[in-house]
Amino acid sequence: MTETPTRGPRVGLFATCLMNVFRPNVGFSAVKLLEDAGCTVEVPAAQTCCGQPGYNSGDYDAARALARQVIETFEHYDYIVGPSGSCMATIRHDYPVLFQDDPQWLPRAQALSVKSWELLSFLADVLDATQSDAHYDGTATYHDSCSGLRGLGIKGQPRALLGEVDGLKLKEMEDSEVCCGFGGTFCVKYPEISEKMVDDKVRNILATGADTVVGGDLGCLMNIAGRLKRINAPVKVFHTAEVLAGLADGPGLAGAVKGSD
Amino acid sequence: MEIRSKEFKERSVFAIHDASLQQALGKARGGFVGKRAQQAAELPEFEQLREEAKNTKNEILANLDHYLERYEQAVVAAGGHVHWARDAEEARNIILDICKRVDAKTITKGKSMVSEEIGLNEALIEHGMEVVETDLGEYIIQLAHEPPSHIIAPAVHKTKDQVSDLFEAAHGGPRKTEVADLVNEARQVLRDKYFRADVGITGGNFLVAETGSSIIVTNEGNGDLTQTLAKVHIVTSGIERVVPTLDDATLFLRLLARSATGQETETYTTISTGPRHADDLDGPQEYHVVLVDNGRSKMLGGRFRDMLRCIRCGACMNHCPVYGAVGGHAYGWVYPGPMGSVLTPLIKGLDAAYDLPNACTLNGRCASVCPVKIPLPDLLRELRHMQHQQDITPVMQKRALNLWRFAATRPKLYHALEQVAARVLSGISRKGRIRRLPLASAWTDSRDLPAPAGRTFLELWQGKRGQK
């Protein structure tokens, strides 16, 4: 263990599966934002998945097995914070439901639930962050991911913080609150419907004329970026955290290099 | 109506490639969503009304037997008859018996989803009776020999051109192309049917326990003519549609029109209490209510009770991106969209509609607009849970879940697999993305897969900070 500063809340970073495999830069962006805001960040190695794939597939036993693992790994932190509305809504809302008939685990699930935060919501609603010293040249449109929006009330926070980024213009798209068609395993179980939905989303994105899409959930962003790239649309895709941390200077998701397509 | 929900996948793909369906859906979606949002914004207490409606419905459902008995007493006191139907067959037989007794030749119908649910039209026609749907949308799909694709806009899947063709074929032309002319033509044809009707059948949006009244709402006035001009009026309704008082009914009426069509109120709200009374100028000689259970009392006693709060406004399907992509017919039975995806498996059986609870991204937009706050995504997930428990879930999916669980509960193994995935996917990628991936064609057929950077976050983090 390296020495860690003692001031500020001790935050356990929840490294989501998609972030871990597909977009480590989002993790480093999250760490930077949290440390800049005065937190001590740790990334416990015993973590894996929040269990949502099991829960949403109806396998509640598997979801509980994963939930117990997350609770044991993170319950000694002041907060558990992750760069995903989807995973964090699972921990916040679904864990207490999963253990509602389990007197041993319910209090622990509830205790973790109240200190679980999606990254942008944590920065804005808990740490009162209102400033960003990042710079980004471009016009971005923000996609509201469903779990973050309806599960955790994330709507104004990322927009307010992105509004502070020097050089960045925000332009709203039509139907920004409508699902992009990712939906976890939905996108591969019903690929044609998913394609229709992401096409509608992409059409709304292109109609804004923005050169960048930002959002808070890598599932949605991979879906949107994958479709944009397939139809050769020169729009870059970044996680909100990357832009706010000033780490959106490399290639966007699906390979678009900033400054080119 | 025969259930075809097992063909959901095929039907949805077909729907996505049906150009005129997509044109019709695109038009409808914008209208319903925008108008509802405007109505909700203009009524300061709208959110409060939703909460009140939820609580009132919960109280009704907790005492449903009591309110139904009071309702029955009030109907009888007003000179009407109440019939209890355990299932679709009983409901059909009750209505058939009434129609046969009065020697019915022509039967007019106001819009009734319960009559679709119990397959009433087919049964009446089989017994030689002429059945005429009088709601314009229902009339259109009756001419097209199609089931409704939406619970309040049954012909929403039809374009104006298609309606022109149907009317020309049915009415003998000349072909009309203006909406007003089409409506007028239908009105002329239907007018004669109202006067000839022996029996008029309507649904019941609300049944009022204190007065024994049935309430229907329409925008065309067709329901009024159906129920006042025929000799016999039969109301078909689910047992959950009872409300204690007229006051309670007004609470739901305020929410219904705003949520459904984005109107402050529908054009016609009609309250019927018993048959024609001595001093009435018009009205039916007989008034019957057929209360249909058909799986509802089972819902009442289980974890799907919340679903019985539904007032059939259709807001959930209007706001559902899956419904918006595939339309109502893909769902394969009477009730489409989110509410249908909960009801269909509960009424027709879990394995008769495997896809319906699964063909949902759990995005939650339906629940956010539901006027009685039904947690539709939670109920859909609960149905998936039942499918999982009853081994209706496909074997491959169960195996995949078991493998995932095995790995994800072993962090070292999981991380090793993630590292392999990051390396392999990065290795086969070009310019930051993967265009074809044999085992993931469901993704790569329509999208590129963004490529990983080669190392996982946890690997890089441990290298950087040396934390364990």
Image (spheres, rainbow, N blue to C red):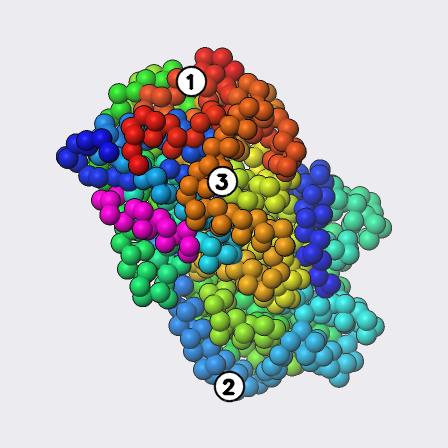
Q: Is residue B139 left or right of residue B451?
A: right
Q: Main secondary structure of the magenta part?
A: helix
The magenta-colored residue range is A64-79
Which sits in the foreground, B387 or B273? Answer: B387
In percent of the image, x 81 and y 71: which residue is there?
B126
Element on which disc 3 rests: loop
Mark 2 vs mark 1, CA separation in Å: 74 Å
- Picture coordinates of residue A241, whole percent (x, y): 35, 29
What's the chain of the residue with tag 3?
A
Instruction: Look at mark 2 in the image and give the residue it sits on.
Output: B73
What's the chain of the residue with tag 2?
B
Quadrant in the picture for residue A170: top left
Looking at the rendered structure, the kind of residue marked 1 is Gly
Q: Is residue B399 left or right of residue A12?
A: right
Mark 3 vs mark 2, CA separation in Å: 47 Å
User: Vertical placement of B460 versus B126: above or below?
Assistant: above
Residue B192 visible somewhere in the drawing: yes
- Picture coordinates of residue B423, whole percent (x, y): 51, 27
Residue B435 within the magenta-colored segment of the rendering? no
- Picture coordinates of residue B365, whole percent (x, y): 47, 48
Instruction: Look at mark 1 in the image and give the residue it sits on.
Output: A250
Label 2: how many residues lie within 10 Å, few (<14), some (14-19) or many (20+)?
Answer: some
What's the chain of the residue with tag 1?
A
Tell which tag, 3 or 2, sits nearer the viewer: 3
